[in-house]
Each structure stands twice: as structure tokens, then as C-alpha cells.
Image: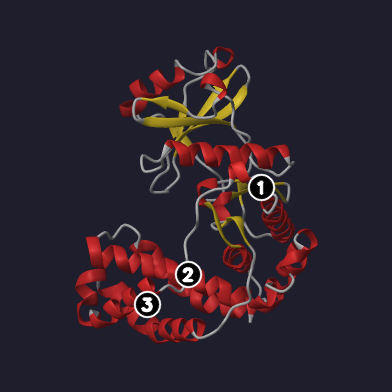
């Protein structure tokens, strides 16, 4: 999808939404038109668009798994980044000057609606995305201690190594576990996957600063208009971690989108180098990390692949299997772009 889509509200949500709307600031009501809901394909997509006298807003329902403390922390980060002139939607103050509204067991927040399309990878957009990614990571280094998020995921862990060993031992049951097509693809990809794991486990990547970092800056978390990034989304993925992994994965996701847009043959290493040049304009501290973006990206991809394997092996959860194809492709794509 090139643009965020909005559709008519599901009638099953009407009563819940009415209760939430009744608790919003009075100067926002009444609505001008019916509320709409996002038609995004995301598993946890629960956003609603409201046309009001004060403008257009997005009402977000937070995941039930997120604690109130985590939600407040995320909102504080977004408010601070917006005050630092980053393209981040600033949350609207709701009850008792809080950015989070509690209705029953659910938590809600309100943000100004930002018009834009998803990041497509066009040249101007790629330059802007690289510079915004660099500026965002560099600014997050200065995040006040009171806003620091929780610790983020770890890469190349002993636990993930054990999951790979279990998956290899279960290779004869891959058809039953994953389905024939996905099992066949995994069998083809397995030698590369294991080779990358063994090489990275034996390699000492350069130390990158531990800081708050957004580690999921994929194309649907960047809104653009007129070639410029207008909004960075999904700050639940902002955690304290080595920034190299976050930067490497962001570079991979954004550059592969740029490659997919091109109709003429393009050297992927050229695209990766162009991206790095623009990122370093706003994040000069990443200079020593850029030559290792391929390894940082692959390490994060391996972590995500191991998470999918773990869900299948330990709980039979298969909802993320559909992105395993993409993650396996990333192993080669990262090396083509950055090595």
C-alpha cells in the first residue's frame, strides 16, 4: 500500500469508541463526520481517524500487552522529540494533563493526523529518510534520563543459538511445522543462515554507543510528502540498545525499498553508499559503524528469524511465518547493499 487507508468504522467498535470520545477534551467535540478506522494489515493495527473542529486527529488504542508505565514512557519520548523539532507526532494532553487516557482496561492516545504516503524509496525520499534516521538517532542520544525507555532486544544470544540448533534437529518436520513451500525455502536458505550465524558469533563487531534507539524504521513507519519525511511512527520500538543494530537494520529496510522501486538495473552497493553519505550528514558519530552496516543488519535479521522459529517450536504460533520469507531474503540483501 502506498498510502495509509481509512475505512468506515466497524459497527462492533461503535459503542467502545463512543465511550472514549465522550472523555476527550470538550473543544474537540462534536466530530465533523463519522470516525474512520485504519485498514492497515498490521496485526495490532487499532488506529482511528477523527475529523474535528480543531483539525484531524488519530486516536490510537494501545496494545493490551503494553503497561501504563511503558505507554507513558513512549508518549514522553514522542513529546520530547517533537519539542526538538523532529518530525514526530506530538501527543495531545488528555485527562489530568496526561497523554494517555484509560477507559476500562484499554489505554488510548490522541495525535495530530499527518498527511502523507508511506516511504516509497524514491531518490529524494531516500536522502530525506537517511538524514532523518541519522538526526533521530543522534537526538535520542540526548534523551532526558526521565524519558529513557526499557532495555531493547539482544542479538546473537546463546538462547537464539539454542533455537537454531533445535530448528536444525527438527528439519525432518519442517513441512508439518511451516508448510511445504516455506519449508523448501528454509532448506535452501539454511546454509547461508548458519554461515552468517557462525561468522557473526565469532566476529567482534565494533562497539556502538548504548542509547535510546528506534530499531524498526521500515517503510511503513515513515510518512513522506513532496520527497520529505513528514512523520516517524511506532515509538513502541524505541528501546535502549547498541545503536549500530538499529542503524544497520533501518538502512537495510529503507535501501531495499529504494532498490524495489527501480526499474533499471542499479548497483545495490551504490544505493547503500548513497544512503550512508546522507545519514552521516546528520549523524557523524556513526562514521565507524557504517562499514559494518551489513553485519549489524544481518545480526538483527537473525534475531527476528529466531523469534519466528521460537514461536513455532514453543507455542505453535504461526502468524509471523508470513514475514519469514522477507527475513530470509534480507540475509542476501544486506550483504549486497553494504558489503
Colouring method of the image: secondary structure
Work out how far the residue at label 1 is from the one at label 3, CA to CA, in angstroms.
33 Å
Judging from the image, what secondary structure is the residue with disc 2 in?
Answer: loop
Res. 192 mark: none
Q: Quadrant of residue 157?
A: bottom left
Whether residue 225 is situated above or below residue 304 in the rendered picture: above
Residue 143, label in figure = 1
As drawn, the residue found furthest toward the right would be: 281
The percent coordinates of residue 180 (x first, y second) are 25, 74
Q: Residue at x 44, y 41 (%)?
A: 39
Residue 267 appears in the picture as rendered: no
**Tag 1–tag 3 contact (CB < 8 Å):** no
**How many circles with numbers are drawn on the protein?**
3
**Mark 2 nearby-residue class (10 Å; few <14, some 14–19, many ≥20):** many
Q: Nearer the viewer, mark 2 or mark 1?
A: 1
* Image side of residue 189 versus residue 257, left or right: left
Separation of residues labelled 2 and 1 (CA atoms): 23 Å
Q: In x, y percent, where is residue 189?
A: 40, 81
Viewport quadrant of the C terminus: bottom right
Q: Secondary structure at mark 3?
A: helix
Measuring 42% from the left and 26% from the top, which residue is drawn there?
102
Q: Earlier in the sequence, mark 2 or mark 1?
A: 1
Q: CA distance from mark 2 to mark 3?
A: 10 Å
Disc on the earlier residue, 2 or 3 = 2
Q: Which residue is mark 3?
A: 161
Q: What residue is pinned by disc 2?
A: 155
Q: Is residue 302 visible?
A: yes
Image position, residue 190 (x, y; %): 37, 83
Secondary structure, mark 1, is loop
The image quadrant of residue 44 is top left
Amino acid at each position: 500500500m502506498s498510502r495509509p487507508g481509512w475505512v468506515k468504522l466497524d459497527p462492533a467498535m461503535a459503542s467502545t469508541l463512543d465511550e472514549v470520545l465522550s472523555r476527550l477534551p470538550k473543544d474537540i467535540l462534536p466530530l465533523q463526520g463519522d470516525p474512520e478506522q485504519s485498514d492497515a494489515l498490521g496485526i495490532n493495527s487499532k488506529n482511528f481517524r477523527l475529523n474535528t473542529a480543531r483539525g484531524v486527529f488519530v486516536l490510537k488504542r494501545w496494545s493490551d500487552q503494553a503497561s501504563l508505565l511503558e505507554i507513558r514512557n513512549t508518549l514522553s519520548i514522542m513529546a520530547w522529540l517533537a519539542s526538538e523539532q523532529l518530525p514526530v507526532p506530538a501527543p495531545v494532553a488528555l485527562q489530568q494533563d496526561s497523554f494517555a487516557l484509560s477507559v476500562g482496561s484499554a489505554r488510548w492516545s490522541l495525535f495530530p493526523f499527518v498527511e502523507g504516503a508511506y516511504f516509497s524509496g524514491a531518490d529524494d525520499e531516500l536522502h530525506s529518510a537517511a538524514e532523518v534516521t541519522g538526526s533521530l538517532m543522534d537526538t535520542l542520544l540526548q534523551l532526558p534520563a526521565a524519558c529513557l525507555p526499557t532495555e531493547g532486544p539482544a542479538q546473537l544470544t546463546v538462547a537464539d543459538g539454542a533455537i537454531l540448533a533445535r530448528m536444525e534437529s527438527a528439519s525432518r518436520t519442517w513441512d508439518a511445522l511451516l508448510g511445504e513451500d516455506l519449508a523448501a525455502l528454509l532448506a535452501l536458505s539454511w546454509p547461508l543462515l548458519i554461515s552468517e550465524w557462525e561468522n557473526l558469533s565469532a566476529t567482534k563487531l565494533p562497539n556502538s554507543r548504548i542509547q535510546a534507539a528506534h530499531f524498526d524504521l521500515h517503510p511503513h513507519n515513515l510518512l513522506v510528502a513532496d520527497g520529505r519525511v513528514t512523520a516517524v511512527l511506532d515509538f513502541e520500538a524505541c528501546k535502549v540498545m547498541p545503536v549500530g543494530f538499529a542503524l544497520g537494520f533501518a538502512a537495510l529496510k529503507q535501501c531495499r525499498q529504494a532498490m524495489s522501486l527501480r526499474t533499471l538495473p542499479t548497483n545495490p552497493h551504490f544505493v547503500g553508499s548513497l544512503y550512508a553519505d546522507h545519514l552521516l550528514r546528520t549523524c557523524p558519530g556513526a562514521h565507524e559503524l557504517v562499514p559494518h552496516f551489513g553485519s549489524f543488519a544481518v545480526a538483527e535479521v537473525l534475531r527476528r528469524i529466531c523469534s519466528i522459529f521460537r514461536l513455532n517450536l514453543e507455542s505453535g504460533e504461526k502468524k509471523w511465518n508470513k514475514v519469514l520469507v522477507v527475513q530470509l531474503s534480507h540475509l542476501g540483501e544486506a550483504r549486497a547493499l553494504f558489503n
